[in-house]
Amino acid sequence: MMGVNPRIEAEEDFQIIKEYTLLPILLDMLARDMNELKKHRDKMIYNHVLMYLKEIEEAIYPELRDLKRRMRARDIRILHTEKNAQGIRVEYKVRGYIHYFTMLRSLVKAELMTLLMNMRRRSG
């Protein structure tokens, strides 16, 4: 990472942090939806959807491990994540300097949909 000012977070740093923050939220949503779908186990289409959601869930864990490895390599740490009705607020440290970002609930939903679509393309 030569030539990068340690005080300035690079776009890639921010992208890594954003994905590392959003993927656990996506896991929670998948778990909630799969629980809801299990009520309809006797319906064939629901079983198909459950299998698909399980595949997505299983694909998230390696992504999280890779993001964690990249965060270590770039000296990035998430210090605190706060979720509330308005959205999320993340405090993080990049190469010793503390930064923050917030995402409104509507943006979180849009970003989650983008993540899901990208994962679907990669697995598809």
Image: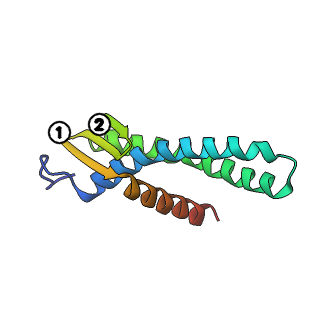
Q: Is residue 6 left or right of residue 30?
A: left
Residue 9 x/y as whole percent: 20, 51
Please give the name of the residue rendered at 50% of the width and 60% of the height, measured from the top-left corner. Answer: 113
Determine whether 103 is above or below 114 in the image.
above
Residue 62 x/y as whole percent: 54, 45
Q: Under tag 1, what secondary structure?
A: strand
Q: Residue 101 or 69: which is nearer the viewer?
A: 101
Please give the name of the residue rendered at 44% of the width and 61% of the height, measured from the top-left corner. Answer: 110
Question: What residue sits right under mark 2 in the picture?
Answer: 77
Find the residue positioned furthest to the front. 85
Q: Nearer the viewer, mark 2 or mark 1?
A: 1
Find the residue positioned furthest to the top. 79
Residue 109 x/y as whole percent: 45, 56
Q: Is residue 27 left or right of residue 97?
A: right
Q: Amino acid at mark 2?
A: Arg
Please give the name of the residue rendered at 62% of the width and 41% of the height, measured from the top-left corner. Answer: 31
Q: Is residue 9 left or right of residue 65?
A: left
- Classify 10 Å Cα crowding around label 2: few (below 14), some (14-19), many (20 and above): some
Q: Quadrant of the C terminus?
A: bottom right
